[in-house]
Image: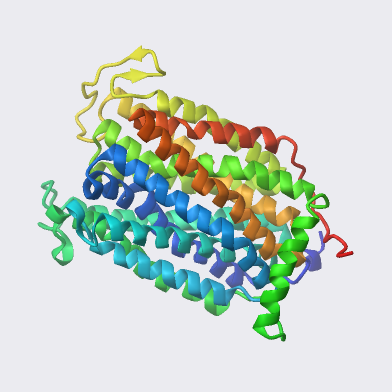
Amino acid sequence: MTESNTSLSLAGTPAASPLGYSSWMLGQAAREPLYVMVVIYIFFPYFSNVVVGDPVQGQALIGYLSAGAGMFMALTIPFLGAIADKNGRRKPWIILSYSVLCVAGIALWWILPGDGGLGVTWGSVLILVFLIAFGYAEVFHNAMLPSVAPANKTGLISGMAFSIANLVAIMLLLLVLFAFALPGTVDWAFLPSQALFGIDPSANGHDRIVGPLGGAWLFLAILPLLLFTPDGEASKRPLSDDIREGLRDVLTTIRQLKHYSNIGRYLLARMFFNDGMVGVVIFSGVYASSTFGWDTTSMLILGLCTTISAMIGVFLGGLLDDKFGSLATLKIALGTMIILMLMLISVQPDTLFYIVSVSEEPVWSSPYFSSIAEITYFLAFQVFASLFLIALSASRTLMARISPPEKVTQFFGMYSLSGSVTAFLAPLLVGSMTALFQSQRVGFASLIVLMVIGGVILLKVKQERVTVADAH
């Protein structure tokens, strides 16, 4: 490959400079740590177990909130993506979505224990806004990848973005652990005697602080993208024309689905497997904290270790993506995760692999992850998290590789829609199955069905770029 070719993006335009695409990677590191702390490890388990006060009802409520957010995004994101394509710029949309996400994250502080502060009702509304803003932020940020990254480094850059995001999440989780969760609970000389800044653990301040902390980081970390990452050239048409043409373009694309059948199959596959995977990660903290009685410190340690595993895994996955292709990398990761999910739900405090009885007594002196079942779940989830990030990165890169550059934001809107559709079906499935059987295990296990369906459809997808269909 010649030097001139190496500087071209997947969109066929000049790629961004190293500063430009590094700033794009930092844009992902701006939002992902907030998601890791709020949704996966700290705030959602706190909301379910402490604010709602019932783990089963709490998991069901979180499922319904995620369903509502997904339904709203499904109805709006493709059209906004098409409008952004016509307008030519993504940064204004990034500023708006990231700003709402930042404010919503900070406001989580006022959801107090036992229906205090904002309470369950208004807290649920705030969580809904948070989830919708995160979805929008993800779409417009992802849509910049095909024009920003050099074509021969797209997989690596996508993987590195996830890896850097996980590194930042590790640092913030460590800060929460040592500055707010552990002080006053263990007698370690290097720890402060009490939580910093007057945070009150009895009011779950160490759980609620993750929202403001993540929001403040997001505000700072998005600035390099806004300053140094190149954006598309703005349309010279009035905004009303861009909106009208964008809406018309979505309808035209829908009429031309036969031409885009390969992309359609991929998005259909992703509609199932993506939210199955995401659902596992979202509900794993709620499920594990209830099943094993893990407290905030245990969840912080789990989050730290899992984030390190994911960071290492997704970096290696990016290299595999560029060497063997996004589709092959995605298939391997997804197949292995299905097997691991079967293992995760087999683990109970006194049982492994559904039928093997084990002792609940500690096998070592640590107060954390000390039984055989806890250690097994912990280790299996490390591998799952690594593969999850590899699959997310390969999914995004595959979409960039097969989409026509002229419609990239619209198709990334549909890419998000393919996750948004099951962003209400999968949580609705978990919430309904949990409530119906009064079992978190059954609700959690129902996600396997979505992953298997998506994996079967993915077998028929090809890694080849489609051209824009003739409008006539």
* Left or right: 16 in relation to 311: right
Q: Residue at x 73, y 54 (%)?
A: 401
Q: Quadrant of residue 422?
A: top right
Q: Position of residue 52 (x, y in %)?
A: 25, 47
Q: Position of residue 151 (x, y in %)?
A: 73, 60
Q: Residue at x 49, y 74 (%)?
A: 96
- Viewer-closest of 162 and 6: 162
Q: Position of residue 428 (x, y in %)?
A: 46, 42
Quadrant of the drawing holding the N terminus: bottom right
- Viewer-closest of 173 and 115: 115
* Left or right: 107 in relation to 224: left
Q: Is residue 87 above or below residue 179?
A: below
Q: Is residue 385 above or below residue 238?
A: above
Q: In this orientation, does residue 313 appear?
A: no
Quadrant of the drawing holding the C terminus: bottom right
Q: Quadrant of residue 305?
A: top left
Q: Position of residue 215 (x, y in %)?
A: 36, 67
Q: Quadrant of residue 88?
A: bottom right
Q: Is residue 307 above or below residue 180?
A: above
Q: Is residue 340 above or below residue 262?
A: above
Q: Residue at x 78, y 47 (%)?
A: 261
* Left or right: 447 in relation to 294: right
- Viewer-closest of 459 and 56: 56
Colour scheme: rainbow
Q: Residue at x 70, y 75 (%)?
A: 244
* Left or right: 446 in relation to 232: left
